[in-house]
Each structure stands twice: as structure tokens, then as C-alpha cells.
Image: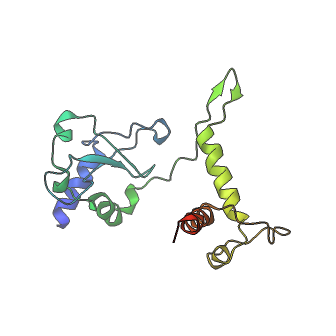
Amino acid sequence: TNMALHQMKHKFQHVDFGRCPRVHCQGQPVLPLGTTDLPQRHTVKVYCCRCSDIYYPRNSRCGSADGAYWGTSFPHLMLMAFPELLRPPSLQVYTPRVYGFKVHNPQTRQLEQRKKRRLECDNPHAVAAGLVPVAGREGAGCQCDRCHDLDSALRARADRPH
């Protein structure tokens, strides 16, 4: 109801549900969220509208409540009703360093390589998906994950005895 949303707005503004634990969110208040609408499946989590992520609540009283009580859509409905509560996302990104030198995360590197392979894909499914093949790569074979999985499945099927 409208009155209940105003009561929740008051609780949000008074930080009754806690603050986002992420440093770059700078103490953004959080809202309760259920990860499922089915009762007695999961306890309540908290949603930060600044980083758009969910966390375990720090308050043990909140952490024992059933998540279905809040449902999966409560924070989003609340922020649609009161868009003035939204703060712009933080543009700060943590860069790990050792003695002043940047440390490259291997997972980040793998993700960048996958993106690059997808952009270099010259197969028809990539063109249909809106990916533009790199000039000079015609006939070089596709390196994207989808084509690799498809090629592996076709080779396995061809190697099977009939």
C-alpha cells in the first residue's frame, strides 16, 4: 500500500536495514530482498541500489527473517515509487597494487580474451548477433566459445562408431 511504502521510505532514510558493506558505495543504505518468493527457502538479504548487488545483512535480527516475506521485487518497486532515493553509481574502481605496481587479475584477463575472441568471430551466427568480424579474418575459423562448443560436439559425434 501507499502508506506502507512511505513507512519503508522512512526506515530506508533512517538506515534501519543497514548500509552497503562495499567501500565505494560510501555507506549507501540498503533495502531488504528475498532471493525467492517461496517461503522457508532462504533468509532475507539486503540490496544496495548503488552497486546493484545483494549481501547478507549484518544485523542478526534481520538475517533470520524469511526472504519470501519481502519477495524478490520489493526494493525495485520501492525505488520506482521513490526515484529520488537513487544515488548515481560509484565510478570508483579498486585497482589492486603491490608496491605501487598494478596487479593483473587472471580472471579479468580471461574475460577480456573471451570478449576479443567473440568480436573476431567470422561465422554467420556472430553476424546475426550483431558482432562485426575483424577485417582480414575471413576463413580463419571462429574462436568464440559458442563455435568452439559446437565444433567439439560435432567432432565427438563424428568420432562415434555408427
Task: In the rendered view, tell whether residue 112 sits above or below residue 127.
Answer: above
Q: Please, which colouring scheme is shown?
A: rainbow
Task: In the rendered view, tell whether residue 133 sits above or below residue 152.
Answer: below
Task: In the rendered view, tell whether residue 88 sits above or below residue 118.
Answer: above
Residue 39 screen position, x and y as percent = 14, 56
Of 35 and 19, nearer the camera is 35
Q: Residue at x 65, y 75 (%)?
A: 130
Residue 12 screen position, x and y as percent = 28, 48
Which residue in the rendered view is the most extreme toward the top?
99
* 69 sits to left or right of 122: left
Q: State which quadrant residue 37 falls in.
A: bottom left
Q: How many marks?
A: 0
Residue 9 screen position, x and y as percent = 26, 54
Of 146 and 95, nearer the camera is 146
Q: Is the N terminus in the top left, top right, bottom left or bottom right quadrant? A: bottom left
Q: State which quadrant residue 155 falls in.
A: bottom right
Which residue in the rendered view is the most extreme toward the left?
40
Of 147 and 108, nearer the camera is 147
Residue 59 screen position, x and y as percent = 23, 35
Task: In the rendered view, tell whether residue 129 sits above or below residue 97.
Answer: below
Q: Residue at x 22, y 54 (%)?
A: 8
Which residue in the rendered view is the most extreme toward the right?
136
